[in-house]
Image (cartoon, helix red, strand yellow):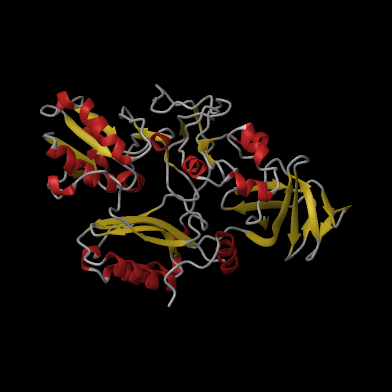
Amino acid sequence: MQLYNTLSAEERAQLIDEAGKDRLTLSFYAYAKIEDPKKFRDDLFIAWNALDALGRIYVAHEGINAQMSVPADNFEAFRETLEAYDFMKGIRLNVAVEQDNHSFLKLTIKVRNKIVADGLNDETFDVTNKGVHLKAKEFNELLSDPNTIVVDFRNHYESEVGHFEGAITPDVENFRESLPIINEQLQDFKEDKNLLMYCTGGIRCEKASAYFKHQGFKNVFQLEGGIIEYTRQIKEEGIQSKFIGKNFVFDHRLGERITDDIISQCHQCGKPCDNHTNCANDACHLLFIQCDECKAAMENCCSTDCRETIHLPWEEQVKLRKGLQVGNKVFRKGKSEALKFKKSGDLPNEPLAKAVKTETRDIRQKIKVKKILIGKAEHYYSKSKIAQFLIENNELSVGDKVLISGPTTGDQEVTISSIFVNGDFSDVAKPGDQITFELPFRVRLSDKLYKIIE
């Protein structure tokens, strides 16, 4: 009986593309007493693996915390697997604002001591004595009260690209760091101020609100369902968004746009930008903000050292990744001396720019993207900026619009102006042909080549 993921991300991405079915990205959490987390974990894996559900899930004696990708066709069947447990009957599923079939490429369910690493001793306070839950309209009203202090309980790389107006944004890399910092900063406001808190999906505030009530704060409120549910409500009810910018998410997308405001800047050149990326050097993998121009010039790297590293023979790159100290660096979240325009914890007085509006679609409405899979990436020649693909299906001609898509590359649309087919210039490539053409960005073996159908 299969209890663990057996496919690589690249293999899973290929299966998803071949299936051609739309998927929903969603998240949920529940605090509950789970006697046997290991058995609970195994039962979930068996049920969800059968439904082709993917994601990153943590279970513990205190409950479950999940971010997932589920085939739209299996959505109701997936919900039934949750309803089988009393503590998840009627649970709210936060469905993403923007959808991406590659948001998760593995089903990973881990047993942890806690579903959120908060550093708290739950035995020392009543974790059920939580703050008042507020819906979007109520949250906006309290936010405008001059007697309110609003706190962002996310990390610096999350609040940097989007936050509520006037929020305190601690310069921290994890949730447990923010609790003592905020408690110390607000010592003088326990009696007379409204403490209004929010996070991505609500789970961090569930524990934080109880903790701050235990610390003596009298008026504690939290955003029900977090930014994700807030966004759904303001769209459905026509409410003005008090959240500006992007909502950072912990999957391949790395962000959902809530408003057109760009409040952050490229960490390398300072240009207004709010697109996160991970350094292409696997020995670094630094999370940082990078504009398209710097992405092309730096080949998706955070520094010239990393750019040089990715051109070393693969065996040498593997050697550079060995060692405890190197491993500790891999999980840095956007702080490096090489990033000249990183400003952790700083809130701009006004947006730096406006994002270009793009249409989003609800894949539950079964609107299909007009594209066909025609090939896969084989190599990228970084010095000459030439990409190599193998054509497997259909034909490709000069003038065609193509979409290059992959877990790291994202979605990049390009118009073919010229191509080499099997080493010679040609206007048309057919199945079985090996083609090359210029690309300003690096492609990877997991990338797929689609032809866009007008």
Position of 149 with respect to 340 (left or right) is left
Query: Could you tell me residue 371's position as x and y percent?
Result: 64, 59
Q: Quadrant of the C terminus?
A: bottom right
Give the residue drawn at x 23%, y 47%.
Answer: 206
Query: Could you tell me residue 349's position as x and y percent?
Result: 39, 21
How many dots with numbers?
Answer: 0
Query: Could you tell me residue 142's position as x and y percent?
Result: 21, 33
Position of 424 with respect to 211 (left or right) is right
Query: 108 and 17: which one is in front?
Result: 108
Give the residue drawn at x 25%, y 37%.
Answer: 197
Query: 376 and 342: which one is in front?
Result: 342
Can residue 453 be seen at all in this image of the molecule?
no
**Is 242 rendered above or below residue 74?**
above
Q: Quadrant of the N terminus?
A: bottom left
**Is 418 rendered above or below residue 182?**
below
Query: Could you tell me residue 452's position as x and y percent?
Result: 67, 55
Position of 254 with respect to 37 (left or right) is right
Q: Residue furthest right?
A: 424
Can residue 137 be seen at all in this image of the molecule?
yes
Q: Residue furthest top?
A: 349
Q: Residue furthest bottom?
A: 1
Give the residue drawn at x 63%, y 34%.
Answer: 305
Quadrant assignment, res 72: bottom left
